[in-house]
Amino acid sequence: MYKRSFFITLLILFLFSNVFSQTSVEATSSVDKNKLKLGDSLIYTITVKRQGAGNFTPEVVPPSFNGFRVVGSYSQNSVAIINMAATVTTNMQYELIAIKSGEVIIDSAYVKFKDPSTGKIETIKTKPITVYVDSGRPKQSITQSPPTPTPEIEEDIKEIKMKLQFRFSDLIPYIIAIIVFILALIIAALFIFKKPTEPVIKYEDVDYKKEALKKLKATKEFLRKNDVKSYYTGVYEAVRYFISMHLKISLHELTTQEIIKKLKELNADKQMIDIINLFMFDCDVVKFADYKPSDKEIEDIYKRAEDIINNFV
């Protein structure tokens, strides 16, 4: 069995040596929209297309995203072989929330790779992208699900394309890696893996509702110092603490979208999920964007947090 698999592997690698005969690298960047409001999100995509193979996979350096807050990132790869030419496409996507109004420029992304013919590290970059952010308050839907990676966008204009030539010997590291990977799969197939059980989280027997209300009351101290952002952060954390203790799960490092997703998985009351979703969104707009709430909104956010703590089931 092992000998047969080994020879099949060598045959595949021999065929691949013809497929990976030439290398070209392209890099582009795009956004799903270039007009939005404070607190709205957009998807920034870096697409790297590589035909052939070099000594290592290109290194992608994203821009600094000044004027935005990164709330998630995703990566997906695909391989296509057409007319004995292999193309590897990598899409790196970043979900960004606008925190600065006006004309915001997303700088160029950089792609570094090794030129197999010279052995030198080459660098190419994408074009910068201009986004217009309105200072108005964003619209929030009642239900909100975590974003999914956007499909690959085909562009008619290629920003940068470099064609390289290399020797068959450059494939040796890939051949060794593929052989090791296939042998590991064969060995793993002989064993039955048991999924480890998650550790049981122990919670202290405390009056968490009373403690949450105490944390909520303490946030008024920030208003006396005219620190509205810290006030909204404290109100948000008081509600997150209460939900975490009530459901006996850890929500400490989760974003608003991840918290809402967790509540849906636990089949929490749908109406209460909608209330919490809208409450947390309004807090995030003040915490991470330039939005300035009115005195009435500041007073209402406290009452809404108090109602969630007292009425959550």
Image (cartoon, rainbow, N blue to C red):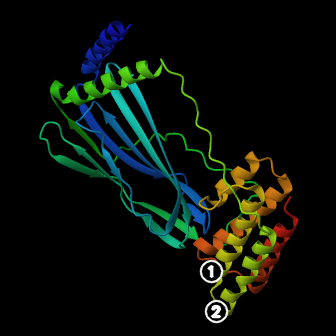
Give whichever of discs 1 and 2 has the lower sequence position. Answer: 2
In the rendering, at what x and y percent does residue 181 appear?
36, 26
In the rendering, at what x and y percent does residue 233 appear?
65, 75
Residue extending furthest bottom? 224
In the rendering, at what x and y percent does residue 252 appear?
62, 62
Is 184 rendered above or below residue 77?
Answer: above
Is 298 rendered above or below residue 90?
Answer: below
Would residue 36 be seen by someone viewing this image from the given angle? yes
Quadrant placement of the C terminus: bottom right
Q: Check disc 1 and report the residue beneath it.
A: 230
In the rendering, at what x and y percent does residue 297 appear?
76, 79
Quadrant placement of the N terminus: top left
Disc 1 versus disc 2: distance between alpha carbons? 10 Å
Q: Is residue 288 left or right of residue 260?
A: left
Q: Check disc 2 and report the residue beneath it.
A: 225
The residue located at (62%, 59%) in the rendering is: 255
Would residue 171 be seen by someone viewing this image from the given angle? no
Q: Which of the 4 image quarters holds residue 171? A: top left
Question: Do callouts 1 and 2 mark residues in contact (Cβ within 8 Å)?
Answer: yes
The residue located at (39%, 24%) in the rendering is: 184
At label 2, the amino acid type is Lys
The residue located at (41%, 29%) in the rendering is: 79
Is 308 rendered above or below residue 200?
Answer: below
* Nearer to the camera, 248 or 125: 248
At label 1, the amino acid type is Ser
Q: Secondary structure at mark 2?
A: loop
Is 9 rendered above or below residue 55?
Answer: above
Q: Which of the 4 image quarters holds residue 293? A: bottom right
Mark 2: few/some/many CA within 10 Å (<14, 14-19, 20+): few
